[in-house]
Amino acid sequence: MRIQSINIQNFRKLLQCHIDFSKETTLFVGANNSGKTSAMDALGKFLAERNFAFNDITISKRADINKIGEEWSQENCNEPTDLLEWESLVPQMDIWLNVSNKEIHYVAEIIPTLKWRGGKLGVRLSFFPKNVSKLFAEYREAYFAARKTEKSKEKVDVNLYPRNLCEFLERNINTYFSMKAFILDPTQFNGKIPQSTSFEMECFTDNPLKDIIKVDMIDAQRGLTDPDSPDSNERAKRQLSDQMRSYYDKHLDPEKSPLPEDLEILKATEDAEKAFNKNLEIKFAPAIHELESLGYPGVADPKLTIVTKMTTGETLKHDSAVQYALSRNDDTLKLPEKYNGLGYQNLISIVFDLMRFRDDWMREGKAKREQTDDNSVIEPLHLVLVEEPEAHLHVQVQQVFIRKAYDVLTNHKFIKENEHFDTQLVISTHSSHIARETNFADLRYFKRLSEGAEGNIATSKVINLSEVFGNGDETDKFVTRYLQTTHCDLFFADAAILVEGSAESMLLPHFIRNKYPELNQRYISILSINGRHSHRLNPLLEKLCLPTLVIADLDTAEKDGHHKAACPERGKGLISSNYTVTGWLVGEKDLDTLLDIPASKKVVIKEGICEYPVRIAYQVPVMINYDGADKEALASTFEDCLVYTNFKLFKDMSIDDTGSLIKDVGNKIKSASSFDEFHKGVYDVLRNGKSDQKAEFALDLIYAVDPSELTIPAYIAEGLEWLQSYLRPEE
């Protein structure tokens, strides 16, 4: 048994959201404020019975709720009799399970028909009014009482509570609303589109999934803090020792349902208690004797004694219950947990929580003997939710965690031996390192939709990245492998910049930092990818709907034959051999035409779940003052365009301490007897340079020149100006 998918409706910014679940681990990724936390909270509130708040209702539904209130506030309004008008307004979650016919005894309450023989089963959990008639009557009573009071004094202009139904519910939502469950029809399952509620299929229990799915959750704010911090109050100073003690109390305490192996420690504890009490009697005897000399206790008063009650659990109630051994050879070298790094404390804390969730689910240890008949059945499905595990964790530790988390949750003999007991792990993260260690097919991308994209407020959509490229596609293989070898910043970015080589990727951050302060404040993902493959990211960009700047090279070549590379010149019938330019974004090969295309024609508006722009930036002519005359220099790559743009800087540069490629460029500038010789010479030097030399070129340039002194090539400057302007918030 496993969760196949969920549909969330009207919950915060998740107006209508479909999420497919992976068999084992599902990873929620996306930029800040994209809806990941909303989805995790929805799972917690619908399945783990956490309390709802009025603000959980999607804001765009407030006006419709107030319309109901306006109707109810009419003098002659009839009392409502059903919940139908609330169906499109209240938070709801459809959960679809994949269940085998051998597990029918677990799901008997949610089987819609006797014809069911295994497969999909669906349940809708809705936060509906408990009693719509009671809500109607009590809202009217409060509303009319407020209006009557307002009119009682003529010169006082005041709006008393409740002014509308939303304001009334904001204070009383859990008084008037509760969870209702409805069985869904698997034959009417329509992928991502929720079916209408069949009110006659209401379940007898509020949560029929309670005995089917066990839900555990680790919140983003786990509460482990530095105990020595002045900002940490006593309540916030939760430490590992607290977790250990809690686990001990539930699963290991020998005083609870003692087993034969517990008798020895219980006897030792009893002997220790007797010895300690004897010591207390001796130590307190002078003080008690002094009290007796003052007339207490009297003849009829009970005698004062000092005793202790010693339990095994009490031995863990101190800050040094958890310690770290600093030496493998000397067991006296130990320090309390607070002296270990907060990162490792949090890692241990998370892993220990996972172990505790697993053992609680399996009724491990003493917990099994204490179960009553009412809750002795182990749920067949264990759903574990973890928010932002990367907090305080080093990069390598993050990667280790995501690789091992699911193994920890399933590391139990009973789980391994019983195929009908399954675990699903859902993690939300902002960490590109965690995303990189996760299978591409397990990623669920949360996309912010701006105001007006759907309704009148910002909402979110979820993209199943396993569906981006289809099955067995070569592009799928390339992108998956590429993203697994790079930082997956793309899933958390406000925009993307694709560049072709290492030189651009090294210098571009400097350009942005020094010249584009607004852009520098945005989360921009810069991906270095060979020009032949930039277009392969297009299906992914279409799903992510990210504003994208593509910085490409013209790669000029001869038109005929095998398109041999050629130094760019006008009027020679040359073409661009870069498919990113010619096939993907511009659709033009002729060099002369490409050089004259205006900037406004280099933006393509693409359509995914929302509109997003892609702008191409390739080399444009550079004017150089050469021997007192203005000359047009045409560039084919980033490197030669950078040289032409910074002609004087390269001409005056000391090349003694630079690498071979910059030396060759410098020598060619100094030795050229004409502009044409200089132009062709620089092209040849850089054309023949290997990729590692071009990386060296960028590094040498950063070493020899302050990047802020470099003039940014015009085509890149145009692209960055466009992106900065596009991302600038509207006033």
Image (cartoon, rainbow, N blue to C red):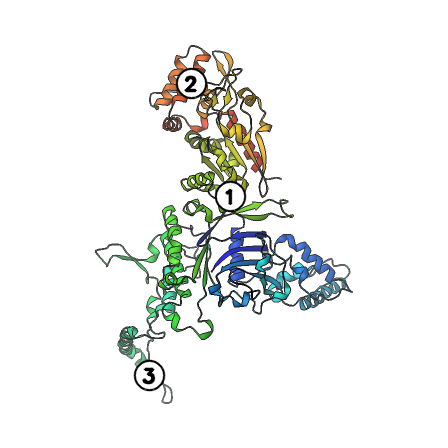
What is the CA distance from the residue labelled 1 to the residue labelled 2? 42 Å
Query: Which is closer to the viewer, label 1 or label 2?
Result: 1
**Picture quadrant where residue 474 is located:** top left
Could you say which disc has been placed on residue 468 in the image?
A: 1
Horizontal side of 134 relative to 631 (left or right) equals right
CA separation in Å, label 3 and label 2: 106 Å
- Which residue appears farthest toward the top when viewing the image? 673
| For marks 3 and 1 on the same chain, the one whose residue lies earlier in the sequence | 3
Residue of label 2: 682
Which is nearer the eye, 157 or 409?
409
Q: Position of residue 199 (x, y in %)?
A: 64, 64
State the SS at label 2: helix
- Direction left: furthest residue: 329
Q: Amino acid at mark 3?
A: Glu
Q: Position of residue 561 (x, y in %)?
A: 47, 20
Q: CA distance from mark 3 to mark 1?
A: 86 Å
What percent of the width, then of the height, locates residue 239? 38, 60
> Would you say residue 227 is visible in this rendering?
no
Mark 2, Cα crowd under 10 Å, few <14 / some 14-19 / many 20+, is many
Q: Judge depth for marks 3 and 2 and give the one in front.
A: 2
Q: Earlier in the sequence, mark 1 or mark 2?
A: 1
The residue carrying mark 3 is: 292
Taking depth in this image into account, of 297 and 9 the one nearest to the observer is: 9
Q: SS class of the residue under badge 3? A: helix
Name above or below for residue 730 compared with residue 598: below
In the image, what residue type sits under mark 2?
Val
Mark 3 or 1: the one toward you: 1
